Amino acid sequence: MPRELQITDFFDIDSPLGKAESEPRAEFDFLLKKVLTLVKDVVFAHSVAFFWANRDKGHMVLESFVSDSSVFMRTKRFPMGHDLCSKISESGKPELLTEVNPLSEFEMLPYYDSPAHVKSFIGAPVFFSQGAVGAAAKPVAVLAADSIVAGAFGSETLILLGQFTKLLSGLINDYTQKYDLLIDSELLSAIERIDDRAKENFTLQNVTTALADESSKMVAMDYLSIVLFDDKRASWMVKKVLNRTHDEYVPVEQPIDFPHSIAAQTIKNNYHSMVDAQSTVSLPRYHTGENFGTNGAFLSLPISSANKCYGSLNVERREKVLFTPQDIRSLKILASQAAGLLEILYMNDLIDEYVIIDEKTGVCSKKYFTQRLDEELHRADDGGTDLSLLLVGVDHHNELHERFGRDGFDRVMGSLAKAIRSSVRSYDLVGRVDVNKFAVVLIRTTANEAYLWSEKIRKTVSGNVIELDGKNFSVTISAGVAGAQEGITRDELLNNAVAVLEKAVTAGGNAVRVY
C-alpha cells in the first residue's frame, strides 16, 4: 500500500516561509539553499556554491553551498584573483571547463581547502541591476558548480544554469525590497519613539538621549556621541556619549576643536563625512590631543533643520567596516527628526525671553522670576531687610510623568501653583523655574520664618485633592529654604536652596530643609 502523502512532502512547515512574520534574511538564506540543492540534483554536481563579488574589499564571499566534499572551504572568503569564480565576476560571462588540470585545480577552484579531484566546472554570473545595465553592469554574485566526472557539463547545462541565475536575481531583488521595507518600518518606529519621549518630557537632554538610543539601534556601532553648542561656555561640546566597549573614549562635556576637527567640519559645512581609518586623515575626530585611538570607520552627520545646524551625530566602529548608504540615510532621517524638535525647544526659549507668565501654571516664567529675584536682592541690600528663597520640588515627578504624560503633568503643576499662591502673601513672588519645580521669594522674611511658610505650603499641597482624567489623588512636595545674606548673588542663593532641597528629597520627600 503506497504511503499517504503529507503536507511536509510539499511544504517545509518549520521553514521561514511557514511563519507569519518571517525575517527577510532568513527567507533568502532558506530559498537560496533550496535553489542550490536543486541545481546540484539537476546537473548531478559534486558541489554547488553561491559567492558574492565584493569588489570594494577585493574578495569573493561565500554565502551558501551544498557539497559532497569533506574539504570544502571552511573560511567565508578568498581574494579575487585568476580563479574561475573571480574571472566570471570580472567579465560577466559564464565559464565552462570540461577537463580540470589536476596541477592547477587549487588555483582555479580556491573554494576547496585541499584538492577535491574535480574534473569539470561550470559557473554563471548573477546580476542585480541598480542603475547600470548592459555592458556597464557587473555581476553581484557567481553561481558555481563542479563535478568529479570529466565532461560532466555541456552547453545545455549552461543554458539550464542561466535559468537558475535568473531565479537567483529575482530572489535577490525580492530580498532587497523586503529588507528596505523592513528598514523603513524600523525607522518609522524609531521616529515615533523619539516623538513619544519628547512628549513625555520635552527637554534638550531627553531629545538627545532619544536620538542616541534610537541611532544605536539602527546601525552597528561601538561608539556614539552627540555634539551641541553650550551657550554658557560659548563652545561646541560633546553632550552625549554611548560606549559599548571597555576602551576609553571622548568624555561628556569635552569641548571640540572648532573648526579643526571632523565633528566641527560636519557642523560648519552642514554635510556628513566618513573616514575608514583615523590614520588616513589629519584632523582629529573631536579635539587635538585626544588619546583614544582606533583605526576603524568614523561617520559624522549634521543635526540640522532647514534653518540651522544644531550639532553633529557621530558614530564609530573599531573595525574598518564602512557605514553603508542605508546606514547614512537612516541616521540622517533620525538626526533631522531630532533637529526639528531642537528647533521647537530653541524657539520656546526665544519666546520665553519675552514672556513673563508661565502659561501652564499662571505663575512667573523662569526668566522673569530670576530677573525679579535680582531686583529684590538689591532692594533688600539697599533697605537692610530680610529676604528668603523657597525652592519647591514635586516628589516622584517621574512617576507622574509616566502616568499622565506631559500635558497631564502640566495640569498637576497648575493645581500646585494655585495651592502655593494661596499659601503666601500677595506681594511674594512665585515662579516656575523647572519642569517640576517652583520657587518663592518671601519678602522681609528671615530663614526661620520662611521655614514656617514652607511648612504651611507643604501641608496645603499634601491636603489638596487633584482631579485628573477621572482620577482623584494628591501629591507631596519637598522644599529647600535659603536666607539671603548681605551681598549674596542670585546664583549663590539659588545654589543654597538647591542643596537643601536635595537633602529633603534624599530624606524621603514630603519634607522641608533650611540652609
Image (tube, rainbow, N blue to C red):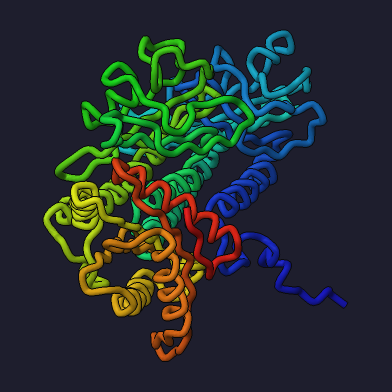
Q: Is residue 295 positioned above or below 212 on the image?
A: above
Residue 148 is at least partly visible in this image = yes
Residue 349 is at least partly visible in this image = no
Q: Nearer the viewer, residue 135 or 45?
A: 135
Residue located at (30% from left, 31% from top): 233
Residue located at (22% from left, 64% from top): 364
Residue 106: which quarter of the image? top right
Q: Nearer the viewer, residue 471 or 20?
A: 471
Q: Is residue 259 positioned above or below 409 on the image?
A: above
Residue located at (22% from left, 74% from top): 426
Residue located at (56% from left, 29% from top): 123
Residue 292 percent across, percent down from the top left: 53, 19
Residue 74 percent across, percent down from the top left: 74, 28
Residue closest to the far right = 1
Left or right of 207, for residue 27: right
Residue 324: which quarter of the image? top left
Residue 229: which quarter of the image? top left
Q: How many marks?
A: 0
Q: Quadrant of the N terminus?
A: bottom right
Left or right of 357, for residue 42: right
Residue 2 percent across, percent down from the top left: 84, 75
Left or right of 352, for residue 150: right
Q: Nearer the viewer, residue 413 or 376?
A: 376
Residue closest to the far left = 354
